[in-house]
Amino acid sequence: MLHSEPQIAPPIEDQILEAIISASLPTDSEAPTGTGFSGPDPNRNPNPNLPSPLALAAAFHLPLSKILDILASPLTRTRLAAAQELRDLAFHQREQSAREKALAALENILDTSEDPIEKRRAATAILRRHSNRNPFWPRTPGAGATTLDLDEDEDLDEDAAPPRAPLPDPEFPRFCRPAQETLIRLLTRLQDNHNPTPNAGLATLFRHKHEANKLEPAVQREALADYLEAPGEDANLTNFSCAILHTTEPDPNLPAAWAGHKAHPPGHERTHRVTLHWPDHHRTVQLRLINAGNGIADLWQIAGIEIGPKQTTPDSS
């Protein structure tokens, strides 16, 4: 008589991860559409099915403190972020494929249709798709937007997209804003570079640079004007269609005395890797952030940017 070996249950941490991921990550048919920024935004598409710590404690018969310790673990947070990143990348690839199919359909209408209105609509959509501005985001009129003069054809109103809400004026670094939140805010501004004014995104990037913040106010204003005239490689960071923010590992060099402290040590640095996607290429960028604040509150600024070469092959990062 053969006896099967007893199955060993996976570690409790893996069971909790499975419960969270299966509830928080939509299936392909439920993938969210977002509003332009497709990176791991923690505030996007909240899922009411996500189990609460109390529900997890009840389901696994563990003290709430044990559940909270597991959720607070840097390794758990890294794994959850990796799962979210993978879903975002898969959704972006599906979205890109769908856009290519839509473009092929528009081109077919342009080539075969005898209806002048249909041909004009197809041509307008293609022109919008290949705009040298951000091709996927409608622009707010007057905010550096490029508009098409179509002799006020009212029949196109049904295809018009609503204008984007104007962003604030170029921003300065803020105390008590986490490093990743600061980076996501910068990417949001750079993705909509001309909102609410031309090069407002690049102006925000300049104001977050550590070296720029060492300048006297009058000198900084002059340097900003020169920067916007010739931003150099930073011009390659604007008007992308999607950003994938890659997970950073917990910093093993963080002094033990700062463990659990609300702020990082002054001068502490963190490096984030981001892949920026445009319709026909992508670039991988490394941004080094430094805490210019104090022992009470963080103030993250950009200490360095490394922009990778233009890539047209599928992104496997």
Image (cartoon, grey):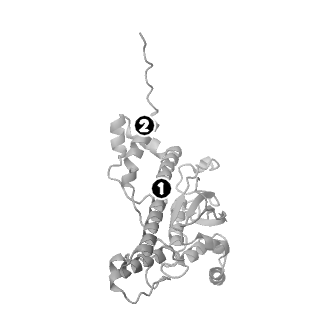
Compared with 49, 177 (above or below) is below
- Closer-to-camera residue (312/126): 126
The residue type indicated by label 2 comes to: Gln
- At x 39% / y 45%, what residue is drawn? 22
Q: Residue at x 39, y 42 (%)?
A: 19
- The amino acid beneath tag 1 is Asp
Q: Quadrant of residue 117?
A: bottom left
Front position in the image: 199 or 114: 114
Q: Nearer the viewer, mark 2 or mark 1?
A: 1
Q: Is residue 138 visible?
A: no
* Disc 1: which residue: 88
| Mark positioned earlier in the residue sequence (2 or 1) | 2
Measured in 3D between alpha carbons, the distance from the residue under mark 2 to the one under mark 1, in whole angstroms, is 23 Å
Kindly identify which numbered label has been placed on residue 311: none
Q: Quadrant of the N terminus?
A: top left
Mark 2 = which residue?
15
